[in-house]
Image (cartoon, rainbow, N blue to C red):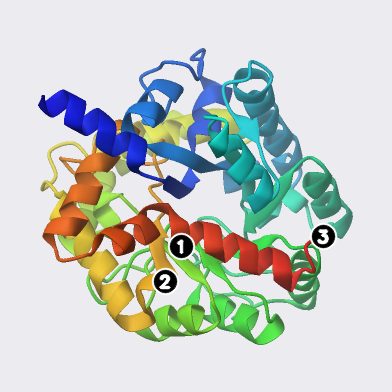
Amino acid sequence: MRNKANAGEAQDLFVFDAHCDTATVLADKAWGFRRSPAHIDLGKARKGGLKAQVFAVWVDPLFAPHRALKRGLEVLQALETKVFAPGLAVKVVSVAGMDQAVAAGRLAAWVFLEGGHALENSLEVLAVFRSLGVRGMTLTHGRNNDWADSSTDVPRLRGLSALGKRIVREMERTGMAIDVSHVSDATTRAVLRSVNAPLLASHSNARSLCDVPRNLPDDLVRAIAAGGGFIGVNFHPAFIRRRVYEQIEENFARHAREIKARSRGKEDDPKLLSDLEWEYFQKAVQGNNRVFLDDLIDHVVHIAALGGIGCVGLGSDFDGIASTPADLRNAAHYPALAAGLRRRGFRAGEVRRVCGLNLRHFLRRVARAGNGR
């Protein structure tokens, strides 16, 4: 009886997640999307009630400056050949298209770019990605690019360059979601000053609960919410509890000499270096303190208290993280998240908003800001 109840609950859920890195897994592995060891595949999506997903086309900054565009197109092509061409999900570019796909029982797939360095400083390349169905972009990743600062690099611009302002204004004009996860606080503030469109922080948590640079300070949570923006909570334990972040940093430090030795002479092979980085990231999370669903929900509660229930939702970072909360291991487990929200006092309508409807409403606001183009 319990399995039948879980299946019914998943069917009733509208889970819409703002960020995953499954496209990179599909580009780098022989796996298909119907069933795989990844955090997200079609079977897990159906079991967990995942109806719509933003797939990030992540480009490791190691590919910058001159091979980032090529890498972005390769990851995008993996989605086309392994997900869209076989009919396992429907690529959508509007809320209306998403609604149609969901009504037909299909997984609706949005495509966003992660890492503005993939533009190689070209507004024309931004237009090309948009013509290929990309409807949002995370402005930076772990390193600065030529026009925006990252939260995890030494500040250089302290905001946006003139080119950066042109890029975010063009994104606003064409109805593309401007994603400030990974960017520095100063860059986020510069974006808020440069555009009127609502902002996205697709996979970021609350810094006052977990004091790491990748999370948002309270004033930016309020500012993003006040502008009609959306914040998707990240499932990575290092962004949920500070102690886990510290443990990962300590583990990386122990491997530093080995990493340096293995990468020596390979500086011109960004794919090898990226794979090596991921290998040690997986090692660094082993044996760390466990994080649980309620620890993640603490961030939902805090963000909702600051910005209102309408600003917060899910940005799992599935398939881009090497560990997860112990009771939220992959996309099949979303019913447990919904149940956890109810236990914490969220009403049924609020659970639906956090699980997916808030992100849907946000994307409608983005389209309106760009006149629906």
How far across and down, in percent of the image, does residue 37 sit?
35, 20
43 and 130: which is toward the camera: 43
How far across and down, in percent of the image, does residue 277 sit?
43, 37
| Residue 323 shows in this picture | no
The residue beneath circle 2 is 310
Give how far apart the Cα atoms at labels 3 and 1 are. 21 Å
How far across and down, in percent of the image, does residue 26 sit?
54, 24
The residue beneath circle 1 is 358
Amino acid type shown at disc 3: Arg
55 and 147: which is toward the camera: 55
Quarter the N terminus occupies: top left
The residue beneath circle 3 is 373
Badge 2 vs badge 1, beta-carbon distance below 8 Å: yes
What secondary structure is marked by label 1?
helix
| Residue 206 shows in this picture | yes
Query: In which image quadrant can residue 329 be found?
Result: top left
What secondary structure is marked by label 3?
loop
Q: Residue at x 62, y 52 (%)?
A: 115
Using residue 354 as the reference point, say whether residue 68 is left or right of it. Answer: right
Tell me which label, 2 or 3, sits earlier in the chain: 2
Residue neighbourhood size for the residue with mark 1, other residues' Cα within 10 Å, grouped as few (<14), some (14–19), many (≥20): many
Give how far apart the Cα atoms at labels 2 and 1 are. 6 Å
How far across and down, in percent of the image, does residue 183 sit?
53, 67
Give how far apart the Cα atoms at labels 2 and 3 are. 24 Å
What secondary structure is marked by label 2?
helix
Amino acid type shown at disc 1: Asn
Q: Residue at x 45, y 23 (%)?
A: 42
263 versus 245 height, above or below:
above
Amino acid type shown at disc 2: Gly
139 and 14: which is toward the camera: 14
